[in-house]
């Protein structure tokens, strides 16, 4: 591939990663055409950022009349396959998109919802790779581990913090010693910029883990400490944990919780990111949940 048109199409502008990618691109003199259902708020408007209405969930919609050589897709991966030909027709020759290591860690889940997500991710990854290669688009798929940061829109660390603030304790199953590698959304946004024109990253998928590995219980303990709270854990049997999840799911914010979360507290969900470091200089930081102090 030669030099890319500096303009970038961005989906998922209001996702955990999207808002962090935008200023990085603008700082490099790359205009951003954000495609989505929600227009930017007054506080989000900035020179070089242009919003265009597009609902990716409706594949019959026409593409807005804008061209760019690069697409960064931070929305759900399974929304992308039906749009690749349309993006290609608008000049896209480089795609960076996000999947998840959940495609590996949740394959044995007892939750129909989680299995559906896993199957959608696997199918979408396969489709994106095959379709991009057919169209001559250089693709890169990122599979992050447990994402945190941004404006607190993540469903991981921010949700743990909300439970701690509400109840002052956190329920765990067993020793909760399974290892985790939380990855900051800011490091993932930086990875987009790093790999954008790195030929070694073309037509590959990468597992992107955080820069620190720690036990699940220690991750939660650090969240307690960041919030200025004394760590307090309630170790409960699986049956009680299932009931707690059932009650929590009554609140829309926690509708995605599943009892399998308890079992995964004991499992190591660890991935090597050395190939990303080698190919485009990926260098994630240690787990730092200090952003939680600014959240309501």
Image (cartoon, rainbow, N blue to C red):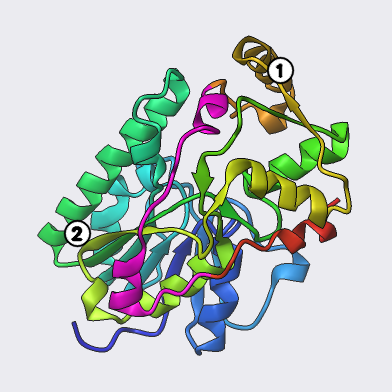
**Taking the image as drawn, is residue 15 in sight?**
no
Q: Residues within 10 Å of mark 2 (few under 14, many from 20)?
A: many
Total numbered circles: 2
Q: Is residue 269 magenta?
A: yes
* Residue 194 visible in the snapshot: yes
**Relative to 62, is 233 on the left or the right?**
right
167 shown above or below 178: above
Residue 244, numbered label = 1
The structure residue drawn at horizontal position 27% and vertical position 72%, both measured from the top left corner, is 91
Q: Secondary structure at mark 1?
A: helix
Q: Is residue 247 left or right of residue 57?
A: right
Horizontal side, residue 43 vs residue 157: left or right: right
Q: Residues within 10 Å of mark 1 (few under 14, many from 20)?
A: some
Real-space Cα distance between discs 2 and 1? Answer: 44 Å
Residue for badge 2: 132
* Residue appearing at x 43%, y 18% in the figure: 110
- Magenta segment range? 260-284
Q: Position of residue 224 (x, y in %)?
A: 79, 48
**Is residue 117 within the magenta segment?**
no
As displayed, is residue 144 above or below residue 252?
below
* Among the two numbered marks 2 and 1 on one chain, the one whose residue lies closer to the N terminus: 2
Residue 289 locus on image (x, y percent): 71, 59
């Amino acid at each position: 591939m030669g030099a890319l048109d500096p303009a970038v199409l961005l989906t998922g502008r209001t996702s955990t990663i999207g808002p962090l990618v935008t200023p990085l691109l603008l700082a490099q003199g790359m205009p951003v055409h954000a495609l989505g259902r929600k227009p930017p708020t007054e506080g989000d408007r900035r020179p070089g950022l242009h919003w265009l209405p597009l609902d990716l969930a409706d594949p019959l919609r026409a593409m807005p009349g804008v061209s760019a050589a690069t697409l960064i897709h931070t929305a759900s991966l399974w929304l992308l396959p039906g749009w690749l030909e349309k993006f290609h027709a608008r000049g896209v020759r480089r795609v960076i998109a996000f999947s998840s290591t959940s495609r590996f860690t949740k394959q044995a889940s007892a939750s129909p919802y989680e299995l559906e997500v896993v199957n959608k991710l696997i199918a979408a990854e396969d489709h994106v790779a095959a379709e991009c290669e057919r169209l001559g688009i250089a693709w890169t798929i990122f599979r992050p581990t447990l994402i945190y940061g941004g404006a607190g829109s993540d469903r991981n660390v921010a949700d743990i913090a909300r439970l701690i603030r509400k109840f002052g304790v956190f329920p765990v199953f067993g020793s909760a010693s399974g290892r985790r590698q939380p990855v900051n959304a800011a490091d993932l946004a930086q990875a987009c910029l790093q790999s954008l024109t790195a030929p070694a990253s073309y037509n590959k998928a990468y597992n992107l883990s955080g820069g620190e590995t720690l036990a699940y219980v220690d991750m939660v303990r650090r969240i307690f400490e960041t919030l200025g709270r004394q760590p307090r854990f309630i170790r409960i049997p699986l049956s009680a944990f299932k009931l707690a999840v059932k009650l929590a799911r009554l609140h829309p914010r926690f509708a995605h919780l599943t009892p399998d979360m308890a079992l995964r507290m004991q499992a190591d969900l660890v991935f090597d990111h050395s190939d990303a470091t080698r190919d485009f200089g990926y260098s994630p930081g240690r787990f730092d949940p200090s952003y939680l102090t600014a959240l309501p």
